[in-house]
Image (cartoon, coloured by chain):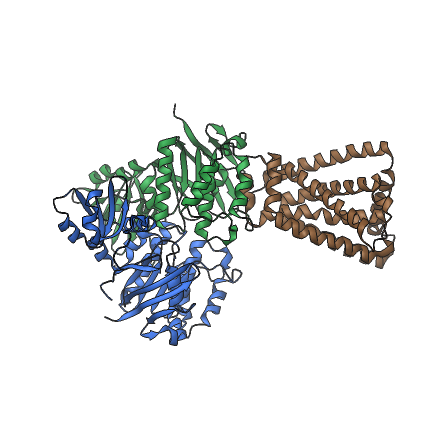
């Protein structure tokens, strides 16, 4: 059943998939060109992951547009299966696009990224971690609010960003927001650094699995209540 | 012990500005039930609740004897559905939909799908959004009929379709019942279609069941008495189900023709009602402002 | 009799579809129902009537004027109801009315307000908040507020419950009471036609099958059922034939003649409802392998 559900989303959304896949690939290349030598491997991976996670999102939200959710929910599947399939789809597609991003980083003539670093296990694990974390964060919103949820989330994040930037400019870098962003960046850096350590990786993998299950359970609960 | 395809008991659901209250009715296996009611009365809500697209507030829905929430998956593998809104992916073709939906149904029949596609004259490679409304509905019907479903739940499956197709569809549905013991629940505004094939009729009005009766019983024991205000007074009571005043007099709907004749005295004209008459007389205040 | 609408030899081709030689008339003070299977050409005819498309051949005269030369004037005197409004959803009832009003020189706001109140349409309510039936009523109120002499409705009752439908039909009947105004409406719901139409025009496959009074349909059209061996004898009476293994069912436009022809034989000749007629005529067309199908040319109504 899960395979059938994933197939459903992939097949019916293949046009959107192809279109966005191409678009994002160009964005990766463009980003490298814009960033020039200032782009670090870690930075590149984090930023491309934020884009990549939206590929499965664009596929999933199409359901909301034409009441197609009524179709999926009327099939002999449970809401839990629908949610699980979409988590699988999201992590899978997001990861695939990360592979594309890394490939672009390797092949682009204007890329200044160190090849060895880019294909190191640390980098790949970071890519996967980012996708898993982002999926865990985004999907509950999607399941609760549909495509509007994503719009809302994006707008909220944008607003938060603007507020943060304004406040840091006005009040100096010691504000909560400024510190918050710094803390986030630092956390990501240390994550990246630690991914070289096998013990850390094992523990971290367990954490990711837990986070995913927790997020999935939340999404199942939310989607189960949703009027279709 | 009757075998019921569908049992709805005490179903309740509230929305802002609308509430379904204590809805109960039963459809025995091998029969067709028509669901009628004015726009906004709750027909689509009932159907969505049966399909568990919406969570019920209270009450029980059993399909093939199983609870529709606990055994949702199993039940839905045996239900063919058509909704009164399009629920397919606009940019995908009919064939795409088939490829994606067929694997979910254990009793899917490619042969049935092909045959129906041909008979309904639907192009398999056209995008869903390129189809006219009527063809979109036909497509939903093809899907619902291609997996040997034991229960068909159809919400306005004939709106926008010409009488010829409608009649053929009804014949098809009747055949399914007779030959294969399938059951059908279908809601429609075209009451003449129901008069043709329904075994049971359930009327929903303002979120409540006004009646759920065998069609033949309904059309034979109910009647319309035409008269004046005296008739209205004479027929007051439980059996007076509705009335309508017009410049030409009053029409009173009674659920017991014999009793009505007794009460009204000789010389009173009592007509057999059509389903449409029943609906019209049971809706509205009986006072038409002009 | 004054004809409010005259269609003569109408031709229009699209890819895969053609309207051919359609002719019918509608006198003042009557209601005409336009029926036919999906894709038969009903909407095309209406579009041509409103000047939304130009015919390839033939002529349409409405209110005594030629549509091709006086289209704008004619349109200002025709009220058109085409499904429930699905545009300008964010406007209020009154707002939408004020927009529509600009297109019609004879717009009467008092009439609209009166109709809105009769139809129970709150002037301040937004169109998107109206149910489908209410929107159809709104469309009707708009069409009735500019002193239109001809009301044209394209499937106005589809998706409406019987209560609304009956109300709508009663409104239409009231509209023609003055003997000067007429109604043309296309529908799939034949029981509505049987309730209110004076004339019935049946279009199939781009051609006119008949256009005549409802009474004449009732009196003259019917079904003939008998054994296959009798089929050849009656072919010239039949407008559409459906055969099964041992018997045939045919539609005839002359029940009396058929009765006389088959008197004493094992044949049933009976009146048919509109729906029956449509059913058998369509089936016969689909199964035209019988070689007969529509042997005779399209019929002309009494008022041609």
Image position, residue C9 (x, y; %): 32, 67
The outermost residue toward the left is C264
Residue C108 is drawn in which quadrant? bottom left
Nearer to us in this view, B117 or A124: B117
Question: What colour is chain A?
Answer: brown
- In the figure, the green chain has which letter? B
Q: Quadrant of the C terminus of chain B?
A: bottom left
Image position, residue A39 (x, y; %): 85, 52
Give the residue displayed 62% in from the left and 35% down from the top.
A2
Give the residue displayed 14% in from the left and 50% down from the top.
C261
Viewer can see residue B201: no
Image position, residue B43 (x, y; %): 44, 43
Compared across the picture, whether A122 is left or right of C89 comes to right
Nearer to us in this view, B12 or A49: A49
Residue A8 is drawn in which quadrant? top right
Question: What colour is chain C?
Answer: blue
Image vertical order of residue A197 relative to residue C79, above or below = above
Nearer to us in this view, B281 or A130: A130
Compared across the picture, whether C137 is left or right of A149 comes to left
Image vertical order of residue B62 relative to residue C238, above or below = above
Nearer to us in this view, B213 or C192: C192
Give the residue displayed 23% in from the left and 55% down from the top.
C217
Q: Quadrant of the N terminus of chain B?
A: top left
């Amino acid at each position: 059943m899960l395979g059938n559900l994933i197939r459903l989303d992939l097949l019916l959304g293949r046009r959107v998939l192809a279109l966005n896949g191409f678009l994002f690939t160009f964005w990766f290349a463009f980003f490298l060109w814009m960033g020039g030598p200032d782009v670090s491997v870690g930075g590149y991976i984090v930023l491309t992951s934020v884009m990549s996670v939206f590929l499965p999102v664009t596929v999933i939200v199409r359901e909301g547009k034409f009441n197609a959710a009524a179709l999926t929910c009327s099939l002999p599947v449970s809401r839990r299966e629908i949610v699980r399939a979409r988590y699988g789809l999201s992590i899978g597609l997001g990861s695939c696009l990360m592979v594309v991003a890394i490939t672009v980083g390797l092949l682009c003539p204007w890329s200044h990224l160190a090849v060895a670093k880019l294909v190191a296990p640390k980098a790949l694990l970071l890519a996967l971690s980012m996708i898993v974390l982002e999926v865990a964060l985004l999907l509950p919103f999607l399941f609760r609010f549909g495509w509007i949820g994503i719009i809302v989330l994006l707008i909220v994040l944008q607003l938060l960003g603007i507020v943060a930037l304004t406040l840091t400019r006005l009040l100096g870098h010691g504000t909560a927001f400024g510190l918050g962003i710094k803390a986030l960046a630092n956390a990501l850096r240390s994550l990246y650094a630690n991914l070289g350590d096998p013990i850390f990786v094992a523990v971290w993998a367990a954490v990711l699995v837990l986070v995913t299950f927790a997020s999935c359970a939340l999404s199942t609960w939310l989607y189960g209540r949703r009027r279709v | 012990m009757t075998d019921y395809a569908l049992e709805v008991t005490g179903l309740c659901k509230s929305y802002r500005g609308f509430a379904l209250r204590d809805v109960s009715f039963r459809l025995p296996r091998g029969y067709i039930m028509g669901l009628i009611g004015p726009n906004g009365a709750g027909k689509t809500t009932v159907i969505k609740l049966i399909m568990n697209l919406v969570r019920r507030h209270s009450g029980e829905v059993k399909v093939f004897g199983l609870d529709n929430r606990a055994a949702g998956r199993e039940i839905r593998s045996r239900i063919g559905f058509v909704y009164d809104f399009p629920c397919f992916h606009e940019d995908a073709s009919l064939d795409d939909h088939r490829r994606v939906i067929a694997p979910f149904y254990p009793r899917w029949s490619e042969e049935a799908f092909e045959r129906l596609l041909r008979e309904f004259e639907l192009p398999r490679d056209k995008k869903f959004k390129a189809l006219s409304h009527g063809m979109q509905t036909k497509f939903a019907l093809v899907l619902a009929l291609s997996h040997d479903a034991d229960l068909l739940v159809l919400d306005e499956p004939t709106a926008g379709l010409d009488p010829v197709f409608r009649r053929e569809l009804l014949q098809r549905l009747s055949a399914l019942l007779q030959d294969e013991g399938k059951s059908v629940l279908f809601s429609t505004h075209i009451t003449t279609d129901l008069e043709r094939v329904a075994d049971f009729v359930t009327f929903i009005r303002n979120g409540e069941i006004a009646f759920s009766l065998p069609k033949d019983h309904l059309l034979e024991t109910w009647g319309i008495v035409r008269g004046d205000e005296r008739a209205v007074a004479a027929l007051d009571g439980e059996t007076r189900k509705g009335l309508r005043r017009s410049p030409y007099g009053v029409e009173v709907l009674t659920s017991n023709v014999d009793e009505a004749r007794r009460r009204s005295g000789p010389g009173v004209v009592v007509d057999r009602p059509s389903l449409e008459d029943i609906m019209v007389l049971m809706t509205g205040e009986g006072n038409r402002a002009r | 009799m004054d004809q409010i609408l005259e269609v003569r030899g109408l031709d229009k081709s699209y890819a895969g579809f053609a309207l051919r030689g359609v002719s019918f008339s509608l006198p003042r003070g009557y209601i005409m129902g336009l029926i036919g299977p999906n894709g038969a050409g009903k909407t095309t005819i209406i579009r041509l009537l409103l000047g939304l498309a130009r015919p390839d051949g033939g002529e349409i005269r409405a209110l005594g004027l030629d549509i091709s030369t006086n289209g704008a004037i004619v349109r200002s005197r025709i009220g058109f109801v085409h499904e429930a409004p699905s545009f300008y959803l964010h406007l209020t009832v009154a707002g939408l009315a004020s927009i529509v009003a600009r297109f019609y020189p004879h717009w009467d706001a008092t009439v609209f307000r009166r109709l809105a109140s009769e139809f129970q349409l709150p002037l301040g309510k937004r169109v998107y908040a109206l149910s489908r039936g209410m929107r159809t009523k709104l469309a009707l109120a708009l069409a009735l507020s500019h002193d239109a002499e001809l009301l044209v409705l394209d499937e106005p009752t589809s998706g409406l419950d019987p209560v609304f439908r009956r109300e709508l039909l009663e409104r239409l009947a009231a509209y023609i009471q003055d003997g000067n105004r007429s109604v043309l409406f296309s529908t799939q719901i034949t029981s509505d036609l049987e309730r209110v139409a004076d004339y019935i025009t049946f279009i199939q496959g781009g051609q006119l099958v008949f256009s005549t009074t409802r009474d004449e349909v009732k009196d003259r059209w019917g079904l003939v059922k008998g054994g296959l061996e009798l089929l050849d004898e009656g072919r010239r009476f039949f407008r559409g034939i459906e055969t099964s293994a041992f018997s045939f069912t045919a539609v005839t436009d002359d029940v009396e003649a058929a009765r006389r022809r088959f008197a004493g034989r094992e044949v049933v000749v009976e009146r048919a409802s509109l729906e029956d007629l449509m059913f058998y005529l369509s089936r016969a067309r689909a199964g035209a392998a019988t070689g007969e199908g529509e042997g005779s040319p399209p019929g002309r109504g009494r008022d041609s």
